Image (cartoon, rainbow, N blue to C red):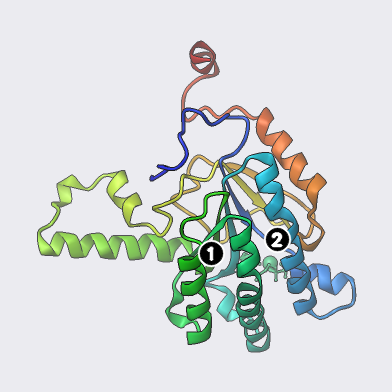
Amino acid sequence: MNVSDLSTASFPSSTPRHIAVIMDGNGRWAKRQGMPRIAGHRKGVETVRKILPLCGKRGIPYLTLFAFSSENWARPSSEVRLLMDLLTSTLENEILGLHENGVRLRVIGDLTRFSGRLRNAIGEAEALTRNNRALNLTLAINYGGRWDLLQACRSIAELVEQGSISAAALTPAVLESRLSTHELPEPDLFIRTGGEKRISNFLLWQLAYTELYFSDTYWPDFNESCFDAVLEEFARRQRRFGKTSAQLKSIA
Ligand code: IPE
Ligand code: IPE
Ligand code: MG
């Protein structure tokens, strides 16, 4: 995967370079307060605002947030509509501030189902921030891991049909180059808030060797001390990638 702007060699392994988050629990948070679900989603946006600067302070250059899954269309249409409005207004209102703070925004997912206004906001935000380097923020909207793998397979099948590549030449690197995350390093750390212990069709290929962390805290309540607790736990883990502990010690 392309990590041209940050060298792997100089990156301390005790700090995750890329964190991927399933921001779950907004609805239950709202219910607990006796409020409508959308109040939880709005509060969830505030959590994002608080977590972004922490990435800079803790030296984390890539953050990927799951904001709307390909399965979330199945929710009541009123919630879907309010979520779309929230996504659009948040993007429109926050982009200048993000740009001033050196954030590069990318959006991954199948955008074809979105309104022209949302697609425009996404296009403008990505273009405006494309040269920023402080934080690579990726929003996954109408994203599904299966969709990502399928669209990658389809684009490779087209290359094979055109005769640009042979089936025998297909490698993991070729597949990765066709995934929507091709500009991002693999996630080192996955966080899911809200208590559920599942992947829910998030980054399926990309999470192969990611450290998984599940928090019972609802996303609207997730704060700096929760974030630091996850980072501390990550620093204590030993990533073996199939090797033995002894092998890793002999390298260190
Ligand atoms: C996550 O919170 C946000 C989205 C899926 C858009 P939920 O809305 O899933 O909250 P819970 O899981 O119902 O509490
Ligand atoms: C996953 O949460 C998607 C997002 C946070 C955007 P869900 O709440 O949709 O996941 P399930 O349905 O509980 O698996
Ligand atoms: Mg949920």
Task: Name the residue located 66 percent from the left edge and 35 percent from the top edge.
Answer: 234
The picture quadrant for ligand 2 comes to bottom right
Give 81 or 52, whichever is nearer the viewer.
Answer: 52
Q: Position of residue 108 (x, y in %)?
A: 47, 64
Disc 1 is placed on an element classified as strand
Observer able to see residue 60? yes
Whether residue 194 is situated above or below residue 208 in the rendered picture: below
Left or right: 172, with 71 as reference point: left
Of the residues shown, which amino acid type is indicated by label 1? Ala
Q: Is there a contact, CB below 8 Å, between mark 2 and mark 1? A: no
Q: Position of residue 127 (x, y in %)?
A: 45, 67
Extreme residue toward the front, this view:
100
CB of residue at label 1: within 8 Å of ligand 2?
yes
Extreme residue toward the right, this view:
33
Q: Residues within 10 Å of mark 2 (few under 14, many from 20)?
A: some
Disc 2 is placed on an element classified as helix
Whether residue 21 is situated above or below residue 120 in the rendered picture: above
Whether residue 205 is situated above or below residue 219 in the rendered picture: above
Give 77 or 184, whichever is nearer the viewer.
Answer: 184
Of the residues shown, which amino acid type is indicated by label 2? Val
Left or right: 54, with 207 as reference point: right
| Numbered badge on residue 140 | 1
Which residue position is annotated with label 2? Answer: 48
Give the Cα separation between the discs numbered 2 and 1: 14 Å
Question: Which quadrant: the N terminus?
Answer: top left
Task: Name the residue located 57 percent from the left edge and 45 percent from the top edge.
Answer: 61
Whether residue 149 is situated above or below residue 121 in the rendered picture: above
Left or right: 71, with 172 as reference point: right
Closer to the observer: label 2 or label 1? Answer: 2
